[in-house]
Image: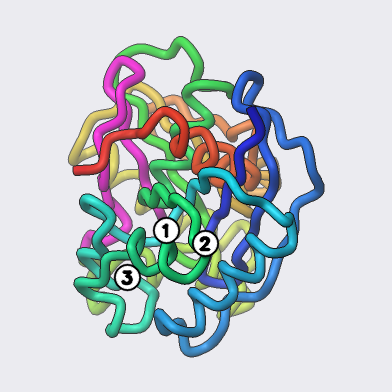
Amino acid sequence: MTLLGIDVGGSGIKGALVDSETGEMISERFRIPTPIPRTPEAMTDVIAEVVAHFDYKGKVGCGFPTIIKKGICKATGNLDPTWLGVNVEELLEKKTGLDFTVINDADAAGYATMNYGIGRGEQGLVIMITIGTGLGSGAFLDGKLIPNFELGQIPYKKYSKIESWAAGSAKDNEGLSYKKWGKRFNKFLQYVELIVSPDLIILGGGASKDFDEFKDQIKIGTKVIPAELQNHAGIIGAAIASQHKAPKV
């Protein structure tokens, strides 16, 4: 079965067709910049454009960059505040006429990585960190998803959330070298290790493909590895979630 997966990020909204059996992308990725401001109306229009690009009529999976419970946005993260309390699934279904499954974006990336990628078969507590505009995190215990595990929201010093200081966007916005940014990211990982004591940390998102540039700055005891699916994981995981109905809680 062919499924459409959409990965909504702070800088871009990306989609592709995915083979539900193999978890492989079977089309080129199509990307549109995320509109500013990131309002429900503007972002819904862009997501509908992505759907229309593929002339697709089936089930759609969508990874969304904040806490989603039963399809409802429970925190705004890096989005416009007007998203709070919006039923994202209903909004997208009304806009497109298609059946949407919406889950947290880091959960989607982790879902793909744990089922089709480097995390397959890993036991214990595995944390998937997606590095982008924010720091998304997905948690898996013996391969089963623990949804909405938002470790990037931890307060840090003067910052209301540590992702404002240690995400990939902070590196880009402040012109930091990978060495300087890597030290910040390592501090975030130290908090992750302290709070949840994971058995393995897998890095995804845009910066994961440059892991060799900052791996020397990672100095925690927990094993840290890059996701081989890299920034395609969010699309793949969202697509597969639409078929298997990943937990919506």
Residue type (three-letter) at the residue carrying disc 1: Phe
> In screen coordinates, is 84 left or right of 164?
left
Q: Would you say the residues marked 1 and 3 are in contact, meaning their CB atoms lie under 8 Å apart?
A: no
Q: Residue at x 20, y 64 (%)?
A: 74
Query: Which residue is label 3 attached to?
Result: 77
Query: Which residue is label 1 attached to?
Result: 64
Q: Would you say the residues marked 1 and 2 are in contact, meaning their CB atoms lie under 8 Å apart?
A: yes
Q: Residue at x 35, y 52 (%)?
A: 188
Q: Residue at x 69, y 43 (%)?
A: 17
Answer above or below: position of 239 versus 76. Answer: above
Q: Residues within 10 Å of mark 2 (few under 14, many from 20)?
A: many
Q: Position of residue 103 (x, y in %)?
A: 37, 49
Q: Position of residue 76 (x, y in %)?
A: 29, 72
| Front-most of residues 131 and 7 | 7
Answer above or below: position of 140 versus 213. Answer: above
The reply to whether the magenta stretch includes residue 56 is no
Magenta-drawn segment: 136-154
What label sits on residue 8 in the rendered view? 2
> In screen coordinates, is 97 left or right of 72?
right
Q: Secondary structure at mark 1?
A: strand
Answer above or below: position of 222 versus 206. Answer: above
Task: Please report whichever mark, 3 or 2, sits nearer to the chain's N-terminal start.
Answer: 2
Q: Residues within 10 Å of mark 3 (few under 14, many from 20)?
A: many
What label sits on residue 37 in the rendered view? none
Residue type (three-letter) at the residue carrying disc 3: Gly
Cα–Cα span, label 1 and label 2: 5 Å
